[in-house]
Amino acid sequence: MGKVIKIRNLEIGQGRPKICALIIGDTEEEILDLARKSNDVACDMAEFRADHYEHVQDPEKLKNILIRLREITCKPLIFTFRRFEEGGKVKVPISYYVEVLRLVAEGGYAEIIDVEQSVVEDDASLIPMLKEMGAHIILSLHDFNSTPTQSEILKTFLKMEKMGADIIKVAYMPNSKKDVLSLVNATEEMTSNYSSCPVVAISMGHLGMITRILGEFIESAISFASITRASAPGQINIDNLKTVLNVIHDNYKRVFLIGFMGTGKTAVANCLANKYGLSKTDLDAYIEQKEHQSIADIYNSSSEEVFRSKETKYLRKVISKDYRVVSLGSGVVLKEENVNLIKEKGIIILLTARPETIIQRIKNDKTRPLVGDNMDLEYINSLMSEREQLYQNVADLVISTDDRTIEDICKEIVESLGFTL
């Protein structure tokens, strides 16, 4: 899972894929009209495809239209000058291509500049130079003829990441459904196991159209859409794309169960999994399995600080997998990093219980390292008080488990969330 890039108030690489509207036209009138429309349509950002502009090879006229675009657009802007070799409209020397990118970066005419990987391979100083001027960089690669194998795509991702881009982007033409799946699988592997920056993965044409709506599933960060005309095969109209992405976002949810020890998190997770056929895991049990030690032994052999570090490490691994219900340890909310991870990926349900209920449930449990021999009401109450506000601050839903069956609690969860797990 890659880090999040924040541009203005837009967080790229988190939650629903960001919708990017295409500003693509031959004349200044067409381009500026689309720029105005991009402010009103349901997009998060816009991309100016400069190679379609009839005066793109005139630096002064290009600069003038960039100034106008900057004045008009109210959303983050990507500047893209696609060379003919990568599917663009004009053939230009690489020297002019670099000159244009420098012009955009120096003038601050776009927050993000698209840079072709093939150019960076010949000039490793290009990305640092543009970033020094304040630009964020998308490093892109396009193949309008074919799709490599899954392993080759992964190698390309890793190579691009090392080049220093803020966002990496690939677009391939599929010749079969297997080609589409190769890109999907490679992207999932990259975002789950390797990536430290947002990834954009596109399979072009009608065969690859599915990748434009799968972003949240494989963590592809941006989906490009047309206001009027498309710049690549398979692009979807903005309104249609937003509708589909919102449907997926609203229904593709995980349940994270938080709460103090003894509130019933593990039992509720088991019930949800068994009753609705969901995949589930318990973070503490996962840690014990991987560390070959009990939670209590990890505490006793090191410290709470060491355990919390391991907890975050394994939380990331659990999130990268497709568990639909995750029961979390009582101290997960103590680290803001953990809270951000689970808020990004699902619904946080806080299970509560009275101190008296907690005592009854855990009084014979010797595996609770924070309790030890202090199994009395006053101590339990003080621990709960320390964490109560943290729990309340992050919870999307709070459910009391006092005097209730596990089945009733699960039923309330499903009914309260308003979707079928």
Image: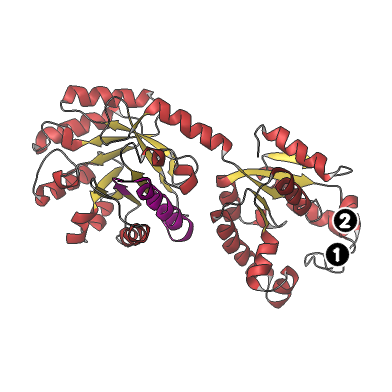
- Lateral position of residue 195 relative to residue 63, left or right: right
Is residue 180 covered in magenta? Answer: yes
The reply to whether residue 363 is visible in this rendering is yes
Q: Is residue 4 left or right of residue 301?
A: left
Quadrant location of residue 112? Answer: top left
At label 2, counting other C-alpha atoms closer than 10 Å, the crowd grade (few under 14, some 14-19, many 20 or more) is some
Q: Which mark is residue 109?
A: none
Quadrant of the image for the C terminus?
top right
Q: Residue at x 21, y 60 (%)?
A: 121
- What residue is pinned by disc 1? 365
Rendering coords of residue 340 (x, y %): 57, 49
205 inside magenta stretch: no
Q: Position of residue 72 (x, y in %)?
A: 28, 27
> Which sits in the foreground, 160 or 45?
160
Residue highlighted by disc 2: 361
Secondary element under disc 1, as helix, strand or loop, is loop
Q: Secondary structure at mark 2?
A: helix
Q: Please name whichever residue, 303 or 285, is drawn nearer the observer in this view of the structure.
A: 285
Name the residue rendered at 75%, 70% in the picture: 296
Amino acid type shown at disc 1: Asp
Q: Position of residue 198 (x, y in %)?
A: 40, 50
For the residues labelled 2 and 1, the Cα–Cα distance comes to: 8 Å
Q: Are marks 2 and 1 in contact (CB under 8 Å)?
A: yes
Q: On the image, which quarter does residue 39 sit in?
A: top left
Q: Which residues are magenta?
A: 170-199
Residue 123 seen by the camera: no
User: Does 311 sit above or below residue 167?
Assistant: below
